[in-house]
Amino acid sequence: MACFIPLFFLLISVSSSQPTELFFPGFKDLNPNNLTLTGVAEIDKHGILRLTNDTSRLQGHAFYSSPFRFKNSPNGQAVSFSTSFVFVSVPEYLKLGGHGLAFTIGVSKDLKALPSQYLGILNATNNGNFSNHLVAVEFDTVQDFEFQDINDNHIGIDLNSLVSNASATAAYSLTTVTQSRISPSKVGSQSKLGSITIRLKKSLM
Ligand SMILES: *[C@@H]1O[C@H](CO)[C@@H](O)[C@H](O)[C@H]1NC(C)=O
Ligand SMILES: *[C@@H]1O[C@H](CO)[C@@H](O)[C@H](O)[C@H]1NC(C)=O
Ligand SMILES: *[C@@H]1O[C@H](CO)[C@@H](O)[C@H](O)[C@H]1NC(C)=O
Ligand SMILES: *[C@@H]1O[C@H](CO)[C@@H](O)[C@H](O)[C@H]1NC(C)=O
Ligand SMILES: CC(=O)N[C@H]1CO[C@H](CO)[C@@H](O)[C@@H]1O
């Protein structure tokens, strides 16, 4: 399965000298110092970050190059953040996905990880070990019974382990939101905002 990431946005609430926002509206004119690519990951000529291709058992990573401080003291509260990104996964065979993609925060860019069911973030030896200091949101399209996956199309919160701490079935939702505009010149007018959230749906691809 090939995974592509066209856009990425991360907002972090910190009060220090590090940036509070990372915004990659595509990767075309990227300063190469900003992103560390490993494995088979590459940026194609259209500015799309491609993590893997159709060859099986490959992995690719793209990490923001500079470390981020999430805690100011060992016992302090970790800062909160929000992120949004858009990705496309293209299974080689329509009904048989690859394994998936994970949004990952870790202490090292050099993950000694395995591809396939390990999603390029952990390996058979360190899986489940709290000294990994790794958190990930997995977008998983294969049900691995060894990791107690709930189905073959889910999102999981992974804390040092591919056995997710929490998971939910990926969903497709189409919502229409009616919202009052807040601009004074438009007070009273209503607008309809259509918004589509496709979290993950193998059968759509
Ligand atoms: C995927 O990338 C690897 C490493 O660059 C390459 O050897 C392989 O031929 C590529 N596979 C396809 C299907 O393009
Ligand atoms: C698994 O990852 C750890 C790092 O977390 C590394 O020290 C170890 O060598 C790796 N094991 C294998 C079998 O790749
Ligand atoms: C977890 O990892 C640490 C550091 O690599 C290692 O010392 C420890 O033995 C590991 N624990 C288990 C249960 O594998
Ligand atoms: C999820 O993580 C919390 C905090 O580490 C832990 O207490 C809880 O047992 C975990 N639940 C599962 C299902 O892993
Ligand atoms: C998104 C991001 O972090 N961009 C940075 C890339 O690197 C240049 C030069 O180091 C910075 O100026 C950008 O802010």
Image: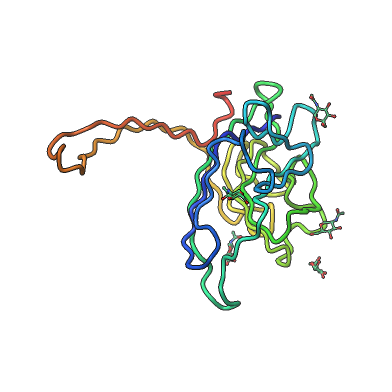
- Residue at the image point whose x is 65% and y is 48% from the top: 34
Relative height, residue 202 to residue 165 (above, below): above
Q: Which of the pair 59/44 is nearer the observer?
A: 44
- Report which quarter residue 100 is drawn in: top right
From the viewer's perspective, is 52 left or right of 191? right
- Residue at the image point whose x is 41% and y is 31% from the top: 196
Relative height, residue 21 to residue 187 (above, below): below
Q: Position of residue 102 (x, y in %)?
A: 64, 45
Relative height, residue 19 to residue 73 (above, below): above
- Residue at the image point whose x is 51% and y is 37% from the top: 199
Q: Please say which color scheme the image uses.
A: rainbow
From the viewer's perspective, is 70 left or right of 99? left
- Residue at the extreme left of the image, as rendered: 188
Q: Which of the pair 184/53 is nearer the observer?
A: 184
Q: Position of residue 23 (x, y in %)?
A: 52, 45
From the viewer's perspective, is 188 left or right of 104? left
Which quadrant does the N terminus fall into?
A: top right
